Image (tube, grey):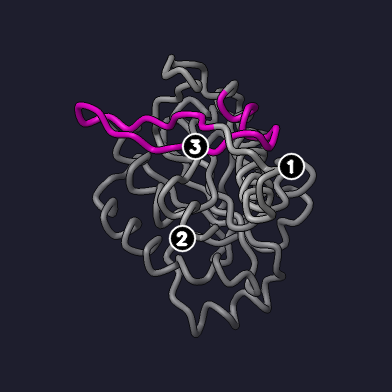
Amino acid sequence: MTYFNQNTGLSADFIPLDEQGNQIQRMYFLKALTQRQYIPIREEKNGKVYYKLYRLDKEKSTINDQILTTVAQFAEIEENFMSYEGKPFPTFKVLDLKGNQYDNQNTQGKILVLKTWFIRCHACVEEMPAMNKMVKAFDHRKDIVFLSLALDNEKKLKEFLSKKSFNYATVANQENFIENTLGFNSFPTHIIVSKSGRILKVFSDGERYLPYYLAKYLK
């Protein structure tokens, strides 16, 4: 299912279609995928990307059943992420490892780009070079804040970051805020918050989606 995730990522900006090719709401599309009856088929027309529901008979093979189960799992994650869109980002007030404070007030009027992670998360660490490129690409913009919220304590983070470059401002000991306030339990998770403090987009794969969505929201 690595192929599915790489080629049919449900965090992509696509136009959802039902079995007959009629456009439907994204939430309905995702809900259908969670029922373990459909897979999304990617189509391109006039420069636009469409995903169409395609019914797959899980009774015909064990492989089909496995595919439908995996697609449903991805769809459930994306359905949850989508439910955050448009909601105010929760009240927060944190200090990064350098002692700089970030809160709802001093990030107002800026795009807030957040990443939740922890040191032993392979995917979290693997994407760091790509995230560093994003920070560098927008270094000239004073209206963007790149902030990472980590589960690990300050001592472990400082030791880790002395060997591994990561150019986001990093905040330690954020397990309670991430899991209980935000409600996230998969890592990494990326959140883009608007200048008015509302959540624009949530997704897992920062390397794949962050460049696209930042460019979209900064137009």
Instruction: Label 2: state its secondary structure.
Output: loop
Q: From the viewer's perspective, tell me whether residue 18 is left or right of residue 83.
A: left
User: Which residue lies at the image location 60% right of the left edge and 55% below the top edge?
Assistant: 116
Left or right: where 174 falls relative to 141: right
- Secondary structure, mark 3, is strand
Above or below, comparing residue 48 to residue 39 in the picture? above
Q: Residue under circle 3?
A: 40
Cα separation, mark 1 vs mark 3, equals 27 Å
Question: x and y percent of residue 62 in the render?
Answer: 69, 55
Residues shaded magenta: 29-54
Nearer the observer, disc 3 or disc 2?
3
Instruction: Specify which label sits upstream in the sequence, 1 or 3.
Output: 3
Q: Which residue is mark 2?
A: 168
Q: Amino acid at mark 1?
A: Gly
Q: Residue at x 67, y 43 (%)?
A: 58
* Quadrant in the picture for residue 16: top left
Q: Are marks 3 and 2 in contact (CB under 8 Å)?
A: no
